[in-house]
Image: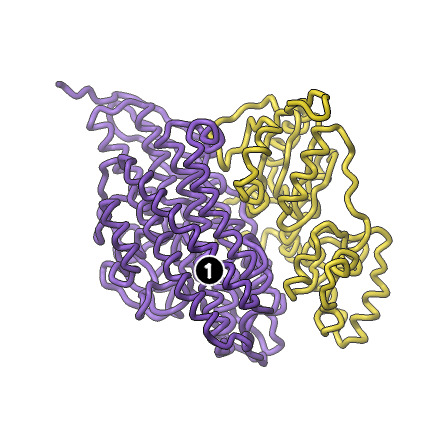
Amino acid sequence: MTVKTVKSLNIDIKHLCRVEGHGDIRIRIEDGKLAECTWAVVETPRFFEVMFRGLSIEMAPILAARICGICSISHSLASARAIEQALKIRIPEPAQKLRLLAMHAETLQSHSLHLFFLVAPDFLNVPSAIPLMQTHPEVVETAARIKGFANKAADLLVGRSTHPMVIKIGGLTQVPRKIQLTELAKDLDATIPYLWKALELFKKFNLPDFVRETEFVSLKGAGEYPFIGGDLVSSDGVSRKEDEYLAMTNEYIVDFSTAKMTRLSRESFAVGALARFNNNYDLLHPKAKGAAEVLNLRPGVHNPFFYNPAQLVECIHVVYESKNLISELIDSDISEFSSPHTVKECEGVGAVEAPRGILYHCYRINEEGKIENSDCVIPTNQNNANIYYDLKKLVEESVAQGKGEEEIANLSQMLIRAYDPCISCSVH
Amino acid sequence: MKYLGITLKRPKVGFFDFTGCEGCQLQIANKEENLKDLFGLVEVVNFREISSERRDDYEIAFIDGCITTDSEVARLKKIREQARILVAMGACACLGGVNNLRSRFHLPDVVKEVYDGHPIDTGPVRKVAEIVPVDIELPGCPISKPEFEWLVRHLILGIKPQFPRYPVCVECKQQLNSCVLDMGMMCLGPVTRAGCNAVCPRNRLGCWGCRGPSEEANLESLMEILKEKGFTEAHIAERMNFFNAFSGILDNDR
């Protein structure tokens, strides 16, 4: 069989669907050569860094949530943590545990939304999850059960799954009653079988065969798979303290995108489920490791389409970890959940692993407790350059393999979707 | 579909996001257990966040986010021409929302600071009603799914929805919550339109006014009470300006 390479090709996708926010793909091939290949974020900026300026610190976690409708709990927590680090506030242990539990609920909610609603339609050949209600009711049922549990947990722990109310500087505004935690544990147990159903579904999907070596950046787990605070690490061997985040991100501006890009040891790096998995595999729950094996996912994987199996592995991890956390909370005194604070002139950084990767908030606070300056570095910003270089390689290889325009357009969209970009968040 | 022997129309609807966090759209995609029923009542022809299908024959348009660029203005006007009913959804679309916090600063300086001189398409923050006529405003940050479903039922039956005009306090008292104002927290519940089931005071946060002012909101009296409790005028103004809910009623300068 002879491979006929495409001589010319023009792909122009405006406002890529089934992703959060607005991004365009432009691919042009002339005389068999790649003339243009861009992933352009065209989201309109909201200038959150400016919005924070002059506000009382108490307002920061509430405003931070509004950066993103999907990962508002992560933003709220990164914001509260940055201020707590600045003012050297130690939050009580029950509050730490409940915050982590809320993070787990968000990870589960966000990953399952992405896997079932945004990714699965590609593999089941439908334009959206809506027709799945007729064609694959069992898939929709599985998604509804998993997401339903995650939403219920967030409602109980932080008030609601989008724009939480309970996270405040120093801890939480309130804690659930033990009887509610017991109910939550029961719901969790009833959810577990659906996770294994999800595993059965996703293991059948044939992921595109594509590899591009990259650097993976995440929090470095100390004793447990990391979600809130700690040291920063890259798979190329860079290690930094949380407040040295700027040395990890190195943001720069390109003229075709309103989202900034980042680099570290190479031209680009990647964050998110696959980065956490690759950098902290040993700390995963045994059940999650078992799921990884079923999905053919091993640490050190450099195929970006494996972001999706890594997300499912993390869903299983957070559910089993949540089970332990809930029983610890039920068995302990949780009456202390907030520490007082006094304001002073200071600066602090909060890093958390949001569903799409490591997220940093940094604030400078004046002696009146007002925010003088702020900086937020979003996971999708950090992935943008990596997506850009992946896309280039994917298109070049596809052309060389003789793939047609439709297939290349399809693969390109699936690649970007695999990263689960959160575009409005990245432009903020 | 029939209801009480009457054949109901299944209107074509579109969802369109502008400058915002997309949290309002997420509320609709959320709570899948009744999504099937909801999508049985309406035909979704345009919802980019969750579907690759895009058609422009919608009768009802749901708009979320505020409007900041010329291209957004043009897109919104085109949607208005097509839609029989246009719904502004969420605090950004209805009020401008938190985005207005940036309006305290000179926009060219803001762009220069964040993008270091790179050309960026942006403009002043405007709510949807500043650009096109809005038929219905669905308030909240984010909107609540039950209220959205309630609105959809009204639209299908052709009944004009009547949103609560009384303040959040009414719903808070109905739930027998302890009053967070009495506990010493700031709360805008006495002057904010109800319909949220007092979800923030119930979670010990106090109300931030995301749904806009209630009817005959007595701001002066609330200011007096808050000052008696030791809050400064600047602190109260900061809270009231957060969602831009009381602009025009309150001096924006701090």
- Residue B112: x and y in percent read 53, 54
Q: Residues within 10 Å of mark 1 (few under 14, many from 20)?
A: many
- Residue B11: x and y in percent read 64, 25
- Position of A63 relative to A69 (above/below): below
Q: Which chain is yellow?
A: B
Chain A, chosen colour in render: purple
Give the quarter of the image for residue A328.
bottom left
The chain letter under disc 1 is A
The residue at 75%/69% (across/down) is: B181
Q: Quadrant of the C terminus of chain B?
A: bottom right
- Residue B122: x and y in percent read 58, 44
Badge 1 marks a residue whose secondary structure is helix
- Residue A167: x and y in percent read 55, 65
- Residue identifier under label 1: A185
From where the camera sits, is residue B253 visible? no
Give the quarter of the image for residue B37.
top right
